[in-house]
Each structure stands twice: as C-alpha cells, then as structure tokens.
Image: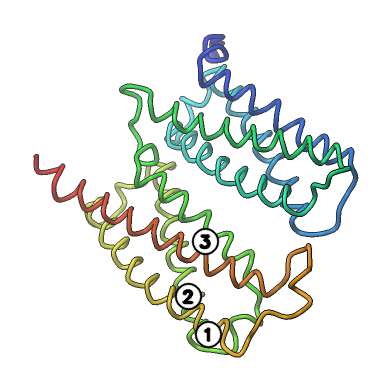
Amino acid sequence: MVTLDFRTLISPVGIVRILEVIFTCISFSLVAAAGYQPGSFWTWSMFTWCFCFCVTVIILLMEFSHIGEKLPISWSDFMTAFAMLSTLMMLTTSIIYSRFYVCSLCSRQIGASVTSWIAFILYAVEVGLIRARSGEISGFLSTVPGLLKVLEVFVACIIFICLDYNDYTQYAGLQWCVAVYSICFIFAILVILFTICRLLTLFPAPFDKVLTCCNLLAVLMYITVVVIWPLYSFKNNPKPNHCINFKGACAWDMLIVISLMTCLNLIAYIVDTVYSFRLVFFVART
C-alpha cells in the first residue's frame, strides 16, 4: 500500500526541496527564453538545472508516498549523495554561467544567475539538514568520508571534461596523470554505487580498512600528479596571445583548471585519508 505523508512536504528538508524545484525551474526557463547559446558551458548549465529539477521532483514524490523506503537501495545514502552532487553542480554552473553569459544588459541571464546561486545555497542547506537529523545518519555517504567521495568523483569529472586528447599524448608523464585520474575515479564511483546498492558486504576484506588503504594510495599517486601535470603541460607552452583578452574558454586555460582541480582533489583525498584513518584506528578502538 502506498501511504501519502504530507508532513514530508512541510518539514524543513521538504520545504527546502520545494524551493530547489522552484528556483532551478526559473533558472532553465529564463535561459531557454533568452535563446540557445552555442558552447559546452551553456549545455552544461542547462543540463545541471534540468537534472537537479527532475531528480528533486522525483525525490519529493518518493518521500511523499514513502516509495523510496521500499526500494532495494540505501535511500538515505542516495538522497545524501544527490544533495552533495547537486550542490557541487550548482556551484560550478553558477560560476560558469555568471562568468561567460551574464552582461549588464542581459536581464534574463542576470535573473538566471541569481536564481542559480540561490539554488546552490538551498542544496548546500539540504546537505546540512540531512546530516543534522539526529539518529537518521545510517549510511556511509552521510558521513564526512562519504561526502568527500562524492566531491572526489565530481572533481575528477571536471578534469575529464577539461582534458583534450592532444594535451596528454605527447608525454608519458601526462599519460600517467590521466591513468591516476581514471583509477581513483573508478574506485570512488564503485564505493558510491556499492554503498547505494547495499553491496559493501561483497568486499573480500573489511570495508573501512580497504577504503583507508586505497585513500592512502590515491594520496601518493595524486602527489606525483600535482608535480608532473604542470611540469609537462606548461613545458614550452606559454599562454597564447589570443587567450589574454578572450572572454570564452581558451584551451590553455583548461590546463590551469586541471592543475587547480588536481590540487583540490589531493586535498580532498588527504582529508579523506586522515578522517578514515582516525575512524578505523582510534574511534573504533574506543
């Protein structure tokens, strides 16, 4: 039997989700009314708003009817992972759209940028509200290491988007960097999927210890990438003159973005490793 629970709509998390639906809908509606703009950044922005809008509506309906609790997945982990992912997507979209498409005479674009920033704040609030529920944090993705796993996957996706085939085929060192990005991304996404699908028991060893060892290995590999990627990417490759006053996305600037995202992921893996190490070897023994 499907039971309808109106309390899910008037709870703090429910109200925040309704506002998310409203502001993401306003964002993509304003941009659609302003007209299509060629370029991957415009496509990414529209995808973000539409994706977050649709999934948030589905979550509202699932929570309202309690169908989500009957699914053969960890529903709390799914909601936490989506809220964290939406927060990161909204942050990047708000920055990108404000940077490349907003002008002083573009009223629709300004409105879309403002509502996008508001949606980002709402999704960040949702993450905090979900984690603040006393006694309801039962899944791995609701913990700090779990949220960091979502961050690591998202940053890796940004790196892959910015990669160009010609950027890393010239040197073996850059190919090593891409291999590190791929290996760490695959492991992180597997952890998220196994957690949501409740398949962590299939790990042949204790999950927390396996996770700590893999995080430590990822830190060591990312340390090499932080050094190797800038060393080879900018070797005999100064910034072209046409990129200096270019308003759009220059290919050389993507190398800077990859370098910054690499440093960000290294920090995330270090924090993840320290936190996991503390949970396994200190908290677990007390």
Amino acid at dot 3: Ala
The image position of residue 49, as x and y in percent, is: 70, 40
Please say if 191 is above or below 221.
above
Numbered badge on residue 232: 1
Q: As drawn, which residue projects farthest toward the left?
A: 286
User: How many residues crowd mark 2 within 10 Å: few (<14), some (14–19), many (20+)?
Assistant: some
Examine the rendered structure and indicate whether residue 264 appears above or below residue 164. above
Circle 2 SS class: helix
Give how far apart the Cα atoms at labels 3 and 2 are: 12 Å
Horizontal and vertical percent for residue 144? 35, 42
Could you give the CA–CA distance between mark 1 and mark 3, rounded to whole angstroms? 19 Å
Camera-side residue: 255 or 205?
255
- Taking the spot 59% from the left edge, 23% from the top edge, the residue there is 60
Front residue of this view, candidates 266 and 7: 266
Name which residue lies at 72% across and 46% down.
47
Check disc 1 and report its element: helix, strand or loop. Answer: helix
Q: Position of residue 182 (x, y in %)?
A: 49, 68
Amino acid of disc 2: Ala
**Residue position for label 2:** 179
In screen coordinates, is 210 left or right of 37? left
